Image: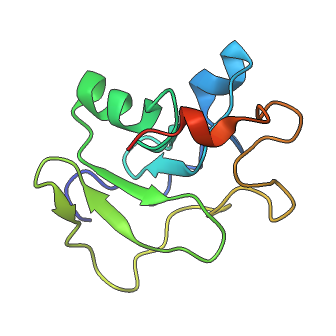
Amino acid sequence: MTDGVDPSVPPSGTGCVECDAAGGWWVHLRRCAQCGHVGCCDSSPGQHASAHHAATAHPVMQSFEPGEEWFWDFAADTDADVPEDLELAPPTSHPDDQPVPGPAGRVPADWLSHVRG
């Protein structure tokens, strides 16, 4: 097993844990490869995936977007060095019918003005 990765842990849900709890929204989703926490990306208003890393020191996350398989190493600030055939427990992305940004019904009409850089 790669340090900071537990392939047996399922994701915490289909959306950002903190945004869902607060009724917020996100641009893209990221999944902690160690504990399964799903948080929003750094372009999202909440930046909860990075906040999760800062709070836990869990170093590796994977995109939680359909069709994306890349991993990121927060500690090294670069692509994570994980085996190409490494697969996390399913599901490996949010549902295909969940819009980006999402979730449906919570994204403001002026969402682009809230996207972080």
Task: Place residue 50 in its image quadrant.
Answer: top left
Point 61% across, 35% down: residue: 16
Residue with the most extreme left position? 76
Q: Residue at the spot x=45%, y=30% of the render?
A: 48
Q: Is residue 80 among what the camera can see? A: yes
Q: Position of residue 113 (x, y in %)?
A: 58, 36
* Residue at image location 26% in from the left, 73% down from the top: 82
- Could you tell whether 96 is left or right of 24 in the image? right
Q: Quadrant of the N terminus?
A: bottom left
| For residue 24, side relative to residue 95 (left or right) | left
The reply, left or right, for residue 38 in relation to residue 47 is right
Q: In the image as oriented, which residue stretches furthest toward the top?
A: 22
Where is residue 47? Give x, y as percent. 43, 33
> Residue 63, position in %: x, y?
49, 60
Picture layout, residue 45 above or below residue 71: above
Identify the residue shown where x is 10% and y is 55%: 76
Q: Residue furthest bottom?
A: 84
State the quadrant of the C terminus: top left
26 to the left or right of 2: right
Rendering quarter of residue 112: top right
